[in-house]
Amino acid sequence: MVQFFVIHGIAESAWAEPYSWARNNISDLGNAHCALQPDPEPRYICSPEHGLMNVSFVALGVLLVVGAALTGGGLWRRGRAAAVARLLLAGAGVGFVSAGLAPADVNENQHVLGALFIMAAGNIGLVVAGFGLAEHVPTPLRWGTSLLGATAFAAFGLFLFRHYLGLGMGGMERVATLPLLLWALVVGVRGLVRRAGRAQKPMPAERLSRAG
């Protein structure tokens, strides 16, 4: 997840005309050609590092799919909610791959379909994930996951109907997109910390005596 934010910063800093988080879509960083984009908001797009950004989209999507597939009892409880959440989150990963392989100015239909997977499937997946996370996951994180997904999905609806509430087109898109990535980052870091903690626990006395 970290690579996405790093490459996002590199790609936007390469623009001759300043890139705006309020005025520009995230996808603008991956557009392959320099041109005036009239819809949904008029803006000139020229992203010298579009190739790097699209590789980042694909890598992010692959990581989401792998993460959804490989995280088991360490993160999820057994049951339908967990299975549905993991499927939807993997769908968001597929959306990122699709968007990265098809920049908006090269294959708009495929790119838009990918974006729909990200913002619809991904955010619904977050809502459901709150009910599917394992019991050892702290309650604030479980409830916060569902609340984050509901907020992001509401932002997705506002973005679709062009109600930006003063945030701009790009700002509202980010409210609909970034919560999923921030959640994945938090959950991933928490998992690494728990694993490191288990590795550092001293061996029980019985095991030590047997080893001796």
Image (cartoon, rainbow, N blue to C red):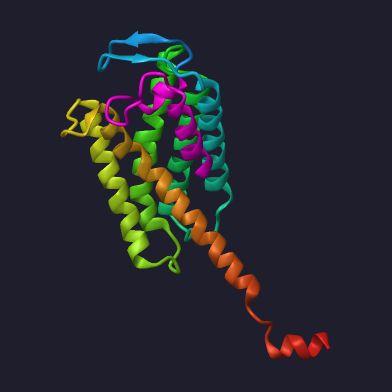
- Tell me what residue is drawn at x 37 percent, y 61 percent: 141
Q: Is 71 left or right of 87, judged from the image as shown?
A: right
- Residue 124 screen position, x and y as percent: 34, 42
- Residue 81 screen position, x and y as percent: 40, 53
- Residue most extreme to the top: 35
- Tell me what residue is drawn at x 51 percent, y 57 percent: 189
Residue 72 sits in quarter? bottom right
Q: Please, is residue 206 above or below residue 119 in the view?
A: below
- Residue 96 screen position, x and y as percent: 47, 31
- Tell me what residue is drawn at x 31 percent, y 50 percent: 148
Using the rendered image of the protein, determine whether residue 146 is visible from the camera's viewpoint.
yes
- Residue most extreme to the right: 212
Residue 137 sits in quarter? bottom left
State which region is magenta: 1-30
Residue 125 sits in quarter? top left
Q: Please, is residue 135 above or below residue 14 in the view?
A: below
- Residue 195 screen position, x and y as percent: 59, 65
- Tell me what residue is drawn at x 40 percent, y 24 percent: 27
